Image (cartoon, helix red, strand yellow):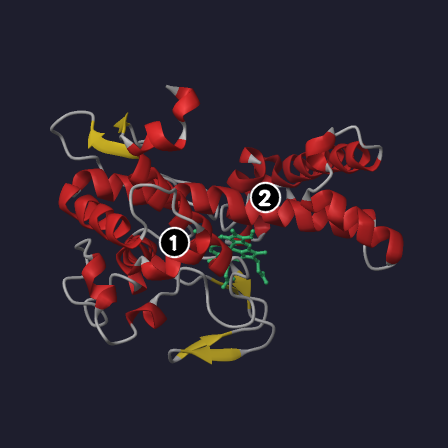
Amino acid sequence: MYDIANNAGPTYPGDFLPILKWTDFGRYERKVKRIGQKSDAFLQGLLDDHRSARGGPESENSMLSRLLSFQKSQPDEYTDDIIKGIIMIMMLAGTDTSAIMLEWIFSNLVNKPEILEKARAEINSQVGEENLVEEPELAKLRYTQAIISETLRLYPAAPLMVPHVSSDDCTLGGYHVPRNTMVLVNAWAIQRDPQLWDDPTSFKPERFLKGENENSKIIAFGIGRRACPGSGLSRRITGLCIASLIQCFEWKRVDDKLVAMDEGTGGVVVPKFDPLKTMCKARPIMNKLFPEAF
Ligand code: HEM
């Protein structure tokens, strides 16, 4: 996964200087073909394990076993290649992005404990301290949702989105774009544009609680028919995850220094430069929810 992610996106110099493709500069083609074969073998192994029920009882209700059951009734639609493609895109597009968003969220929360406390107060008042937050309650957690939106705005997991190619000559913002040109959208810069946002570089979830629909200005999931189909799922998973982590633990920085908020480098998905290190301590609710653990 690491190899695929790092070789995806606009990272190949030959895309910018086509002459380099003649010599397979940096052995890029050979490298990606090898990665492709390796990942195909891995996914085929997963499929075969599920098919022969070698995955154990926990795999019986998995997404893969569901897809394989569709294969029995619609063999032409659900070929092995299609199923491998679905699993691959879910893993590639859905895992790193959501994990990185979570890391940015907690980096912001430990740097701004007052925001963390406000989120906790909302969770206490809407969910209470007896039960772990559940999905239907997420709609009531408006401040938690606002924290997610503000993180997507300032720290989009895919800052240049996924490269697109113009299928025809067109004009974009007054610029002529010939057919077959790679087009990148700088979501990172657009979401910090002072013409669109007040105090654009400050982390202020409150801006999403105003009456206007600020969320419609977020483009971190793309726009239009190729926009991210996992955006709703991702917001729900992340919402559940941060709300339960806030319910169950106290969170603090490891020392007085603020957590550095620099971006690292990557393919499509860009992680933090320094992975987040933080301290956490179990809260009393953990004794009630998981007494056997204490
Ligand atoms: C924080 C979480 C996520 C972010 C920031 C994110 C962002 C994006 C972006 C920017 C694109 C490209 C949109 C474009 O080309 O204009 C995309 C595409 C895609 N995402 Fe996500 N995504 C996230 C989570 C997920 C999840 C959880 C899934 C599925 C489990 C998913 C599945 C996909 C797929 C399949 C595409 C390709 C859509 C297409 O090309 O038609 N993503 N995502």
User: Answer yes or no: do the residues labelled 2 and 1 have beta carbons within 8 Å?
Assistant: no
Question: What SS does tag 1 mark?
Answer: loop
* Residue kind at label 1, given as amino acid type: Pro
Q: Which mark is residue 91?
A: 2
**Image height of 211 relative to 33, above or below:** below
Q: Classify residue 254 as left or right of residue 86.
A: left
Residue visible at 51% across and 39% down in the picture: 6
Q: Measured from the top left, where is residue 101 in percent x and y?
A: 38, 46
Q: Which mark is residue 212?
A: none
Residue visible at 15% across and 25% down in the picture: 255
| Residue that carries the numbered disc 1 in the rendered image | 159
- Please tell me in which quadrant of the rendered image residue 51 appears: top right
Residue visible at 25% across and 48% down in the picture: 124
Q: Classify residue 64 as left or right of residue 269.
A: right
C-alpha separation, residue under disc 2 versus residue under disc 1 = 19 Å
- Which quarter of the rendering shows the C terminus? top left
Q: Measured from the top left, where is residue 232 in percent x and y?
A: 48, 60
- Crowding near pointer 2: few (<14 within 10 Å), some, many (20+)? few
**Image height of 249 relative to 183, above or below:** above
